[in-house]
């Protein structure tokens, strides 16, 4: 089963570059701040739809922010 993990450094850099806190990104994405925190630490994997939404909000390519693990 494949899992989608966050590329932690790229994700945090993209969020900070956009001037968003974890809480602000959570509000815009409809996710909880704690879930954003877990994603940023690669504790949780993410679904394809959520990964797409986050990459659009952060204006970054999907493959820059996320890694598909086998």
Image (tube, grey):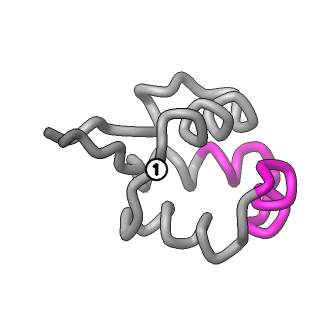
Secondary structure that dominates the magenta span: helix
Decide: is 22 above or below 51.
Answer: below
Q: Secondary structure at mark 1?
A: loop
Magenta highlight range: 14-30
Residue 20 figure quarter: bottom right
Quarter of the image with the C terminus in it: top left
Q: Residue 17 colored magenta? A: yes
x 81%, y 52%: residue: 19
Decide: is 7 above or below 32.
Answer: above
Q: Is residue 1 left or right of residue 68?
A: left
Total numbered circles: 1
From the top left corner, tell me how far across and down residue 56 is, in percent: 70, 28
x 61%, y 64%: residue: 36
Decide: is 41 above or below 70.
Answer: below
Q: Residues within 10 Å of mark 1 (few under 14, many from 20)?
A: some
From the top left corner, tell me how far across and down residue 50 is, in percent: 60, 42
x 41%, y 39%: residue: 66
Quarter of the image with the N terminus in it: top left
Residue 54 figure quarter: top right
Q: In the current view of this chain or complex, which residue is farthest to the top? A: 61
Q: In the current view of this chain or complex, which residue is farthest to the left? A: 70
Residues 46 and 9: in front is 46
Q: Residue 15 colored magenta? A: yes
Residue highlighted by disc 1: 46
From the top left corner, tell me how far across and down residue 44 is, in percent: 41, 64
């Amino acid at each position: 089963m494949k899992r989608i993990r966050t590329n932690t450094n790229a994700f945090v850099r993209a969020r900070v570059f956009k001037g968003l806190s974890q809480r602000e990104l959570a509000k815009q994405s409809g996710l909880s701040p704690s879930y954003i925190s877990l994603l940023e630490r690669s504790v949780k994997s993410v679904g394809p739809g959520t990964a797409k939404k986050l990459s659009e909000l952060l204006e970054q390519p999907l493959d820059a922010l996320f890694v598909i693990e086998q």
